[in-house]
Image (tube, coloured by chain):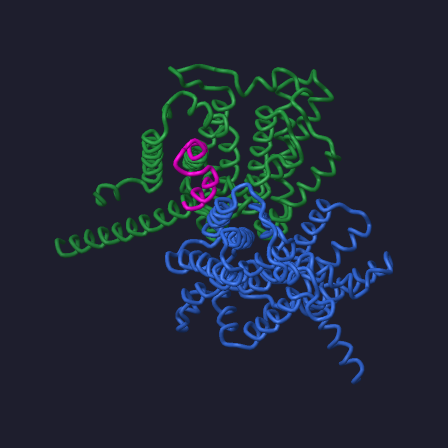
Chain colours: A green, B blue
C-alpha cells in the first residue's frame, strides 16, 4: 500500500488525502444530522468559501516564498469599506471599474508590505504584524465612525453573490463561488506551468540556489506580495457584495483563518511546496466543519473553534509524519535499486 | 584623554540597541511630562503598568521563546482559557484556591502540548501555536459559552485591584520578581546560554550535546504556565471573565519583544531590551492618550514603531557615525 502510494507525487497524494477526509467528514455528519446532505449545505458552504478561497490563495502565494502575510484581514476590511464608500458616492460606476479599484487598492497594500519585506529586508512576520495593526487603524481613521449599509449599495452589487449561474439538482452554482473557483484554478495552473510562477517555488525551496540560478529574489517576492494584495482586494469586493453592511471590524481574524486553510491544504509554512488547489480544499474543509458543527445537536456550537484547532494540529502532524515515512521509503528503495545495479553489473 | 575614552565608551553604549531604546524612552517621558504635569507621578506610572500588566508579564517569557528561534502565538488564547477555567470552576463551587491551582495546571498542560508537538513531533511553532491559538480560545468559549462570570471573592478582586505594598499592586510586584528571576536565568545561567545557542543554530547545539527538544519543551511549558498566571491576574484586575478575555493580546506581546531588539530569527536579544520596549510602549500609549489619540491609531503607531525597530539598525547608524553596529545578543 505504502509502496504504491509512494509512487505518486506527494502533492497529488496530499490532495487525494484531503478529498478523502472531506468525504469522510461529509459522511460522518450525514449520519449525525437530519437532512444534512441537501443542496442548502452546498450553497451555504460555497458562498462563504468564495471569500475564503481567494484569501487562502493570496496567503499561499506569499507562503510559497517563505514569507507570511498577517495583514490580509485588514486589507480585506479596508478594501471592502473603501469600495463600498466609492460605489455609494458614485453609484453609476461601471462594475468592472469597481472591481479593478478594489484589486488595485489591495495591490497597493501588498506593495507596501512587499517593499519592506523584499527591499528593506524586514522579516515578513514583523512587517505584516505591523501592517495588520496599521491598515486597520487607517480603516478606523478613514471610516470616522461611519459604516456602510446595504441600502447605500446598488442592486447589481448586492445581488451578485446570489446570482445562480447554473444548477445541478439542488446544487446552485452561484456567481461569487464560480468566480472564486475559476480564479483559484487559473492561479493553480499558472503556478504549475508558468516559468515566472515557478520562481516562487524556487525561492521558497532554496533562496540561495534560486539567486544563483539568476532569479531576482527581491522582485519576485515583491510581486508575490502585490498579487496577494490584489487577491485580498478582490476578496474585499466579494465581502462587500455578500454582506453589504461593512463596519471597521470587517475581515477581522481572516489572517489566521487563511493561514489555517493553506496549512491544512498542505502548503508548507517554510515555503517551497504546496498548491493553491490544496489551499482551496483546505478552505472548504475548514468551512464545512464550522458550518456542520453549528448544526450538530450533540455538541454545543461553542465547540467550533476548539475542534478547528484540533483539526489543524492533527492535519499538520499527520502530514509531517506520513511525508517523513514516504521520504524514508523512497530513500530505501533508491538505495535497494542502486545496490541491485552494483551487484548485477 | 581619559575624558575622551569615557565619552566614547558612553557613545558606544548609546549606539547599542538598548542605548537607543533608553534615549527614545527619555524623549517620550520628557514629551509626556511637558504635556501633562500629572504624568510623572507615582500613581500614574503604577496605573500605566497596571493597565497592561498581563501582557508585559507574558512578554518576559516570550523573550525566551523568540530568542530560541520559535514563536508562541497561543499566549493570548491561553490567558483567556485560564481566566475562563477559573471562572468556570469558581461558578461550579470549587474552592478558589484549588481553582487557581487547577488553572495553573491547565496552563502547564496546554504549554506542554505546544511543546510536544514542536519539540518532539517536529512541527513549526508558527503552525502549532496558530492551531492552539484557535483551539484554546475555543475551549475557553466552551467553558463559559456566552455568559459573563463575576462576583469573585473579595480577596481575589482586591489582589488584582488594590495596592499590596503601599500603592504597588500584587501583579506589579510579581512582574518585577519574575523579571529578576528570568534575568538571572537568561543572562547568567547555563539554561540561558543554551537558549541563545539553540536559537542561533539548533543543529550545532544538538552536536554540542544539548537536548534541544527538552529545552524547547521546557520553554513552551513555561510559556503556557506564565500565560495562565497572567490570565488569572486579568480575571482579578477586571473582576469579571468572558469568552473573549485577552483576545488578540499575542500581537501586542510579540511587538513589545521584537521592539526590544530580540531577533525574530532567534539567537539574539536581551531581557533588558524587552523591559525598555515595554516602558516605551506603555509611556507612548499613555502620552497618545493624553493627546486624545484613540486606541486604534495608537496601535497603528506601535505598528510603525515595530517596522522601524528593524529598519533603523539596518540604516547603518554606524556608518553615519563611523562606529560599531547594533550589538547582537550578547549578555
User: Percent x, y for residue A307?
Assistant: 42, 43
Q: Residue A294 magenta-drawn?
A: yes
Total number of numbered labels?
A: 0
Figure check: B329 above or below B127: below
Residue at 67 percent of width and 50 percent of height: B303
Q: Is residue A331 left or right of residue B241?
A: left
Q: Main secondary structure of the magenta part?
A: helix
Q: Is residue B310 left or right of residue A300?
A: right
Q: Nearer the viewer, residue B21 or A334?
A: B21
User: Percent x, y for residue A204?
Assistant: 47, 47
Q: Nearer the viewer, residue B38 or B215?
A: B38
Q: Residue extending furthest front? A: B93
> Magenta span covers which residues?
A291-310
Quarter-wise, where is residue B58 in the image? bottom right
The quadrant the N terminus of chain B occupies is bottom right
Quarter-wise, where is residue B27 in the image? bottom right
Figure check: A74 above or below A44: below
Residue at 14 percent of width and 54 percent of height: A345
The quadrant the C terminus of chain B occupies is bottom right
Q: Residue extending furthest bottom? A: B2
Q: Nearer the viewer, residue B289 or B211?
A: B289
Q: Is residue A49 left or right of residue B264?
A: left
Residue at 62 percent of width and 34 percent of height: A250
User: Percent x, y for residue A116?
Assistant: 63, 48
Q: Residue B41 magenta-drawn?
A: no
Amino acid at each position: 500500500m505504502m509502496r504504491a502510494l509512494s509512487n505518486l507525487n506527494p502533492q497529488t497524494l496530499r490532495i487525494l488525502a484531503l478529498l478523502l477526509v472531506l468525504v469522510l467528514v461529509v459522511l460522518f455528519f450525514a449520519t449525525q444530522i437530519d437532512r444534512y446532505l441537501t443542496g442548502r449545505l452546498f450553497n451555504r458552504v460555497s458562498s462563504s468559501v468564495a471569500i475564503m478561497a481567494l484569501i487562502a490563495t493570496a496567503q499561499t502565494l506569499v507562503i510559497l516564498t517563505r514569507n507570511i502575510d498577517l495583514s490580509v484581514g485588514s486589507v480585506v476590511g479596508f478594501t471592502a469599506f473603501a469600495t463600498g464608500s466609492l460605489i455609494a458616492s458614485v453609484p453609476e460606476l461601471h462594475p468592472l471599474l469597481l472591481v479593478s479599484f478594489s484589486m488595485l487598492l489591495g495591490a497597493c497594500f501588498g506593495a507596501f508590505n512587499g517593499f519592506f519585506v523584499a527591499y528593506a529586508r524586514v522579516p515578513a512576520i514583523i512587517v505584516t504584524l505591523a501592517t495588520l495593526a496599521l491598515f486597520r487603524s487607517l480603516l478606523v481613521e478613514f471610516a470616522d465612525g461611519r459604516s456602510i449599509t446595504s441600502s447605500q449599495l446598488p442592486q447589481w452589487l448586492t445581488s451578485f453573490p446570489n446570482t445562480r449561474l447554473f444548477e445541478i439538482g439542488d446544487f446552485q452554482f452561484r456567481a461569487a463561488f464560480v468566480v472564486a473557483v475559476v480564479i483559484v484554478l487559473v492561479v493553480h495552473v499558472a503556478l504549475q506551468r508558468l516559468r515566472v510562477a515557478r520562481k516562487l517555488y524556487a525561492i521558497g525551496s532554496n533562496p540561495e540556489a534560486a539567486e544563483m540560478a539568476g532569479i531576482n529574489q527581491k522582485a519576485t517576492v515583491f510581486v508575490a506580495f502585490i498579487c496577494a494584495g490584489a487577491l485580498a482586494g478582490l476578496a474585499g469586493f466579494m465581502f462587500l457584495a455578500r454582506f453589504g453592511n461593512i463596519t471597521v471590524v470587517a475581515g477581522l481574524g481572516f489572517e489566521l483563518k487563511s493561514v489555517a486553510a493553506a496549512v491544512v491544504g498542505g502548503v508548507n509554512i517554510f515555503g517551497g511546496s504546496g498548491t493553491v488547489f490544496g489551499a482551496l480544499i483546505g478552505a472548504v474543509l475548514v468551512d464545512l466543519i464550522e458550518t456542520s458543527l453549528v448544526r450538530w445537536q450533540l455538541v454545543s456550537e461553542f465547540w467550533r473553534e476548539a475542534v478547528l484547532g484540533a483539526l489543524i494540529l492533527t492535519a499538520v502532524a499527520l502530514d509531517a509524519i506520513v511525508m517523513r515515512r514516504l521520504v524514508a521509503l523512497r530513500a530505501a528503495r533508491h538505495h535497494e535499486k542502486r545496490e541491485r545495479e552494483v551487484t548485477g553489473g | 584623554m581619559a575624558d575622551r575614552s569615557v565619552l566614547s565608551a558612553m557613545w558606544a553604549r548609546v549606539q547599542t540597541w538598548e542605548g537607543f531604546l533608553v534615549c527614545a524612552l527619555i524623549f517620550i517621558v520628557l514629551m509626556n511630562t511637558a504635556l501633562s504635569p500629572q504624568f510623572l507621578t507615582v500613581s500614574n506610572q503604577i496605573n500605566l503598568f497596571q493597565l497592561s500588566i498581563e501582557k508585559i508579564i507574558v512578554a518576559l517569557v516570550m523573550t525566551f521563546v523568540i530568542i530560541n528561534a520559535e514563536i508562541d502565538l497561543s499566549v493570548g488564547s491561553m490567558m483567556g482559557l485560564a481566566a475562563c477555567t477559573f471562572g468556570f470552576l469558581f461558578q461550579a463551587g470549587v474552592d478558589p484556591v484549588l481553582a487557581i491551582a487547577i488553572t495553573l495546571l491547565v496552563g502547564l498542560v496546554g504549554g506542554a502540548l505546544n511543546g510536544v508537538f514542536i519539540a518532539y513531533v517536529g512541527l513549526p511553532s508558527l503552525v502549532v501555536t496558530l492551531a492552539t491559538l484557535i483551539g484554546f480560545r475555543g475551549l475557553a468559549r466552551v467553558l463559559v459559552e456566552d455568559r459573563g462570570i463575576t462576583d469573585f471573592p473579595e480577596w481575589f478582586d482586591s489582589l488584582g485591584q488594590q495596592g499590596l505594598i503601599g500603592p504597588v499592586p500584587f501583579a506589579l510586584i510579581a512582574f518585577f520578581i519574575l523579571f529578576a528571576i528570568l534575568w538571572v536565568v537568561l543572562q547568567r545561567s547555563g539554561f540561558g546560554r543554551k537558549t541563545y545557542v539553540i536559537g542561533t543554530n539548533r543543529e550545532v547545539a544538538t552536536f554540542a550535546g544539548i537536548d534541544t527538544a527538552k529545552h524547547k519543551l521546557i520553554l513552551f511549558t513555561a510559556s503556557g504556565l506564565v500565560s495562565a498566571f497572567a490570565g488569572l491576574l486579568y480575571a482579578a484586575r477586571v473582576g469579571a471573565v468572558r469568552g473573549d478575555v485577552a483576545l488578540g493580546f499575542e500581537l501586542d506581546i510579540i511587538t513589545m519583544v521584537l521592539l526590544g531588539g530580540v531577533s525574530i530569527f532567534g539567537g539574539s536579544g536581551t531581557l533588558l531590551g524587552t523591559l525598555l520596549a515595554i516602558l516605551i510602549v506603555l509611556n507612548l500609549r499613555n502620552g497618545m492618550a493624553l493627546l486624545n489619540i484613540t486606541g486604534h491609531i495608537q496601535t497603528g503607531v506601535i505598528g510603525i514603531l515595530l517596522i522601524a525597530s528593524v529598519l533603523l539598525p539596518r540604516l547603518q547608524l554606524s556608518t553615519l557615525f563611523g562606529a560599531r553596529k547594533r550589538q547582537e545578543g550578547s549578555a
